Image (spheres, grey):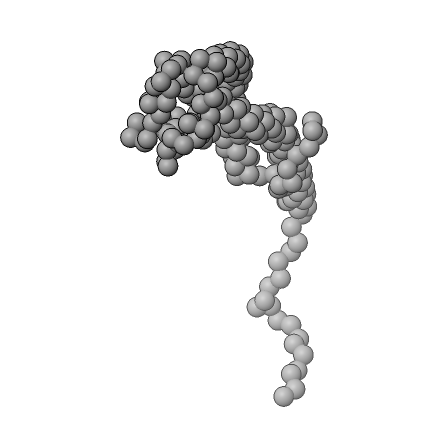
Amino acid sequence: MSGDKIAIFPSRMNVAIMKAKLVGAKKGYELLKKKADALQVRFRKVVRDITVVKTKLGDLMKQSYFSLVESEFVAGDIKNVILNTVAEHATVKIRQRKENVVGVALITNECSIDSTSKDTSMTGLAKGGQKVSETKNKFLEAVKCIVELATLQTWFFTLDEALKLTNRRVNALEHVQIPRIENTIAYMLSELDEMEREDFYRLKKVQNKKAEAKKASEERMLQSLDQAPEEARNLLAEGHDEDLLF
């Protein structure tokens, strides 16, 4: 793109317009570069958090299912009891809110436990109640971890797309738009300089022509003054005039 330029007539006004565009393009490049750096920092943090949360979720799921096996061993088969005591409304609810990060909207999932819904506190009252409660709490922790992981995964894809788009814009400004404007300004300045040189040469030629014409006129005047003056005619002297016929 080194020789690419915008098709525009070279003039002082257009040079001023292109310089203003160049300032705006450089300012936009700096802002987009800062945005890309901020998105890159947040993106790397999200990747690290995803790794940590996935490891944590794996451990929680292991503990939860191991606790479930222990609960079934102590309290027997509690599956039907749990199904019969399921609340009509969800105990765990997900709420979403938006977070703005350098112009990118990130959706955050928040997990909340509805304490007013019907619970299963009486499950396993005969035997193994404490173990059933521990299992329930472990699975609730796993659900919260899953929601957190879903949030991070959503952030990952959103930030990845925003980062790609911002980098494309930064590269377009750096390697296409700014060089094109600079080439256009350099081209117009060179053309204006050439036009000024042509005008200066034309004016010098005109001045030389005028000087030569003036010098020639002065020489002719001097020559006419050097010649002998002719005898003046006497208008009152007697002479024969031709008759005029009317």
Residue 188 lies in quadrant: top right
Of the pair 66 and 82, the residue shown nearer to us: 82
Of the pair 225 and 25, the residue shown nearer to us: 25
61 lies above or below 199: above
**Residue 105 coordinates in the image, percent (x, y):** 45, 31
Residue 3 lies in quadrant: top right
Of the pair 56 and 85, the residue shown nearer to us: 85
Outermost residue on the left side: it is: 116
- Name the residue located 62 percent from the left edge and 71 percent from the top edge: 238
**Residue 127 coordinates in the image, percent (x, y):** 38, 15
- Name the residue located 65 percent from the left edge and 76 percent from the top edge: 241
Residue 246 lies in quadrant: bottom right
**Residue 10 coordinates in the image, percent (x, y):** 61, 38
Residue 56 visible, this angle: no
Q: How many marks?
A: 0
Residue 184 visible, this angle: yes
199 lies above or below 42: below
**Residue 68 coordinates in the image, percent (x, y):** 48, 16
132 lies above or below 111: above
Q: Quadrant of the N terminus?
A: top right
- Name the residue located 52 percent from the left edge and 33 percent from the top edge: 21
102 sits left or right of 190 in the view = left
184 sits left or right of 144 in the view = right
